[in-house]
Amino acid sequence: MTAVEAFAPAKINLTLHVTGRRPDGYHLLDSLVVFGDVGDRLRLTPGPKMTLDVTGPFAAGVPMDRRNLIWRAAETAGWTGRIDLEKRLPHGAGLGGGSADAAAVLRCLCGPDAGDVVGLDTILALGADVPVCLSTMPQRMQGIGERLMPVRPLPMLNLVLVNPGAHVSTPDVFRLLAQRYNPEMPGCSGWSNQPRFIDWLAQQRNDLEQPASDLAPGIRSALDALSRSLLARMSGSGATCFGIYETAAKARDAASEIAARHPDWWVVHTQTKGAVQARRATT
Ligand code: C5P
């Protein structure tokens, strides 16, 4: 029986502007999203019955039944079988989590155009981040997550990701937002020059940083720990923060130093990457 392996890379919101709210309560966003080379790993083995097994450093608390988005993503694609998920990224952490895993399943079963195969509304119903996670390429994301525009060129970035062990609930963060109608990102069209790109990023925001830090003050400590980077921000609704470094060696050194000072934090260095393809494997 042929199994397929898939990779669910970390989704990183380099910016996240909240620009409005829909009548149904969902917030309108304008966000520049990139993907790292760290992520969860999945293996899908076709069979008559759906089963899910979760391993890895962040397996604790991950549902192993239909509550898990990957289970529902597989059903959406009309597939059954055994799914093995190796949870390497903290979840509920602003890195895509279940949405990234669900997107990896859909990409694996339906190809990169899963949105066309299954239907964008069906995919959005799984999670607002699922459409962007399907692409694994730098995107400007608008609406609640359904409007995607590729951003290229974009310089490869050397990042350190830091999660201070705090878990923040996305609905709670949105609820605490003081101002819901903020300006869009100006001039998000692509950069080949890294210093100019970082100058532009420095003028952008994550509007969820303030409410998330009020809920989880550890986010401010994580940003402080990244203060010697070129730029440090929170990703998504938190609590993971990223710092951008000039070189891979500087990112690696910073990650070692932060991890040594905060042994209970999750700290990794990563590079932003291009598309990640599903890979065939045999059982
Ligand atoms: O779609 P997802 O399950 O990821 O969203 C979790 C929650 O975050 C939603 O129920 C909603 O409260 C909030 N959210 C929002 N606007 C968005 C995305 C999420 O208000 N664009």
Image (cartoon, rainbow, N blue to C red):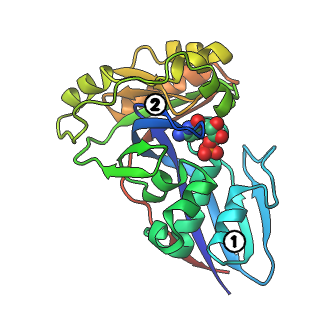
**What x and y, as percent, mark residue 15?**
40, 31
In the picture of the structure, the residue carrying the numbered disc 2 is 20
**What x and y, as percent, mark residue 246?**
30, 28
Q: Amino acid at mark 1?
A: Glu
In the picture of the structure, the residue carrying the numbered disc 1 is 75
**What x and y, as percent, mark residue 272?**
39, 44
Q: Is mark 2 within 8 Å of ligand 1?
A: no
The quadrant holding residue 171 is top right
Q: Is residue 79 above or below residue 273?
A: below
Q: Earlier in the sequence, mark 2 or mark 1?
A: 2
The quadrant holding residue 206 is top left
Tell me if I can see residue 89 in this picture.
no
Q: Is residue 71 left or right of residue 42?
A: right
**What residue is shown at x 44% (from left), y 24% (from top)?**
181
Q: CA distance from mark 2 to mark 1?
A: 33 Å
The C terminus is located in which quarter?
bottom right
**What residue is shown at x 22% (from left), y 42% (from top)?**
190
The reply to whether discs 2 and 1 touch (Cβ–Cβ < 8 Å) is: no
Between residues 6 and 255, which one lies in front from this camera angle? 6
User: Where ligand 1 lies, by image quadrant?
Assistant: top right
Q: Secondary structure at mark 2?
A: strand
**What x and y, as percent, mark residue 66?**
79, 61
Q: Is residue 26 above or below residue 121?
A: above
